[in-house]
Image (spheres, grey):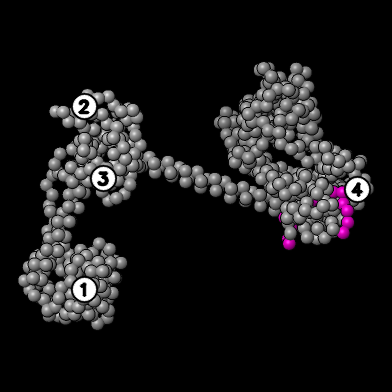
Amino acid sequence: MSPGPVSAPGAGDIKVLVVDDNAANLRMMGELLAATGADASFAKLGAQALRLCERARFQLAVLDLNLPDMDGFQVGDGIRRLQPGCEIVFCSAHNNRENRDRAFGEGAIDFIEKPYEMAATRQRLAMHLERLALRANLSQQVAKLDTMVATIPDAVISADRGQRVVGWNAAAERIFGVPVAVALGRPLSDFLPDSPALMAGTPSAGEPAAAGLRLNGSPWAMRAVRADGRPISVEANLSHWSQAGQDYLTLIVRDVSERVRLVEELRLAKDTAERASRAKSEFLANMSHEIRTPMNAIMGLTHIALRHATDEKTRDCVERIRRSADHLLAIVNDILDLSKIEADRLTLERIEFSPAAVLDRVSELLSEKASTKGLRLVVELDPAVPGRLMGDPLRLRQILINFGDNAVKFADRGVVHVAVRLVGREGDAARVRLAVRDEGIGLSDEQAARLFTDFQQADASTTRKYGGTGLGLSIARRLAHLMGGEVGVDSRPGEGATFWCEVPLELPGAPAPAWAADPPGPAGAESGPSDAAGSRLLVVDDNDINLMIAEEILRNAGMVVETACNGQQALDKLRDGAYDLVLMDLQMPRMDGLQATRALRGQPGYRVTPVVGLTASAMISERDECLAAGMDDVLTKPYEPEQLLAVVARWLRRAKAGPD
């Protein structure tokens, strides 16, 4: 296909800038350019010329070397900065070798000596203008051809046995930026550098295709080079054919650069998302620390206050403070759980547990809330449910408590019924249904559809009237999915609601499912300070309130307690005396808990002494760092007194029993 008529640019389309401080020279140069039809502009100073370049685009600049405000070389530098494509001709009466060498060294296309010789100068200017017009004309033709072939997707290229291009369609012009007239006869390797390897396997006429050559088969990923030298990615299908005893190879070439670019963008987007996730995790870790540290003080001080409070009014106020702190901590834990699940960092335990014990604990946690609202709590365990199962009892309890909290919140009368039933057995697993039914306000189908979404409640008025973050049910859904189960709700407006969860749980001795892990048991899995009385402990924390709380709890349990406010002070005390166990805060000035523990493990007398980390962060990564630094366990703030005493007793017993 031939291109349509094109109006070829002539000298009149070329804009020329002439700079000379001599009026006679300007006039003479103007006459010469007028004879060619060029569009000329004039300036007597370098600064004036540069201002013209800021307002108009020139294809050619004719510059005198000697100007009042700056020399021609400086003007040329300024023009090249403003208009990189503008070509430059220098003029000077000083036609010495130094000026000529510098002019051509700086990219000039000509150097014209003054005084001007009219005929020769006119001829040289006409030659430059014609060349610029031809170049502009060629650019216009290429742009026209590019427009014409834009709708054809694949290039079809044929080459002879000598690897010379003999066929070049419109799409090839578009993809490679080379017109057919230029491409024909050129080596195929100019455009497809890998083509010699392909052609080496091409059969002669009548011969079978060589092994490995993809003829009429799957595309071959290849490198390609555009006319401007830019590499592109292509896929090519190859076909061998013969005509009049001559062998040819035809390639159908598809530009896949956009696809490759998108793949790279996806990779970069993935990297960006991972960095954002890490930043989010760091923010949550900091938030957790900043909230949990004062929470530990509030909960610890309420515990101490309850021990010493004598009148009922004071005890009631302190109990209300404790319940508020528990509620705030539950919100923080929900946000952190959601973050862990989103980052795929939440690990489910797989331990043997008693469903009855899970229900007992749920009953303990819900009974006070239910009785406060005048509700009756009923807990039911199906006798068909196996007495021992394998799974994560903490997370199952969390699901039931989330359901139970909702039931208590939205019911003002009647019964809250918590039930665990056996749905059926599948091999080594039992499918168990956890359900909580209430007689509250109920839900419409539209409201129920939104409930298990992050930060969503039934409607805006729900949050205003009943409070809540809208995270509990979303987390329950995600936990159930991690266990291979599902959640749902059955409800009608005004008739209450039943929230349920069905999960498969293995029987003891069954192989572990894909989601299960066996992480170290949580701090506080054992209880009882009976073996700890008289033990000598060192508590290290930079927060004086946290020190006071830990000291009070441990001394009331009969232990001897000393304190330090940073890692360095702890090391000094450890050098001066013997301790049975060290409670080590992580974030402290001068020397943090990780540094102090590493230094402690380097001392011969303390290589096996139990060290329990105290952290206000609930991130798994921080626990891993603690264990790697040499700590034996980690206790997360805020902690209940029973948790602290349990973990201390457990590690003191292990230390007295000696290494396994």
- Classify residue 353 as left or right of residue 553: left
The image shows residue 142 at horizontal and vertical percentages of: 20, 48
Q: Please name the residue that numbered disc 2 is placed on.
A: 205
Residue at the image point whose x is 86% and y is 43% from the top: 655
Alpha carbons under labels 3 and 2: distance apart: 25 Å
Q: Tell me the magenta residue range.
A: 576-590
Alpha carbons under labels 3 and 4: distance apart: 83 Å
Circle 1: is it few (<14), some (14-19), or many (20+) Cα within 10 Å? many
Question: Which numbered disc flags the more N-terminal residue, 4 or 2?
Answer: 2
Q: Secondary structure at mark 3?
A: helix
Alpha carbons under labels 1 and 3: distance apart: 36 Å
The image shows residue 609 at horizontal and vertical percentages of: 83, 48
Residues at marks 3 and 4 touching, judged by CB atoms closer than 8 Å: no
Circle 3: is it few (<14), some (14-19), or many (20+) Cα within 10 Å? some
The image shows residue 654 at horizontal and vertical percentages of: 85, 40
Q: Amino acid at mark 1?
A: Arg
Q: Please name the residue that numbered disc 4 is placed on.
A: 535
Q: Secondary structure at mark 2?
A: loop
Residue that extends furthest to the bottom in the rendered view of this protein: 68
Q: Please name the residue that numbered disc 3 is placed on.
A: 190
Which of labels 3 and 2 is toward the front?
Answer: 2
Which of labels 4 and 2 is toward the front?
Answer: 2
Question: Which numbered disc flags the more N-terminal residue, 2 or 1?
Answer: 1
Q: Secondary structure at mark 1?
A: helix
Residues at marks 2 and 1 touching, judged by CB atoms closer than 8 Å: no
Q: Secondary structure at mark 4?
A: loop
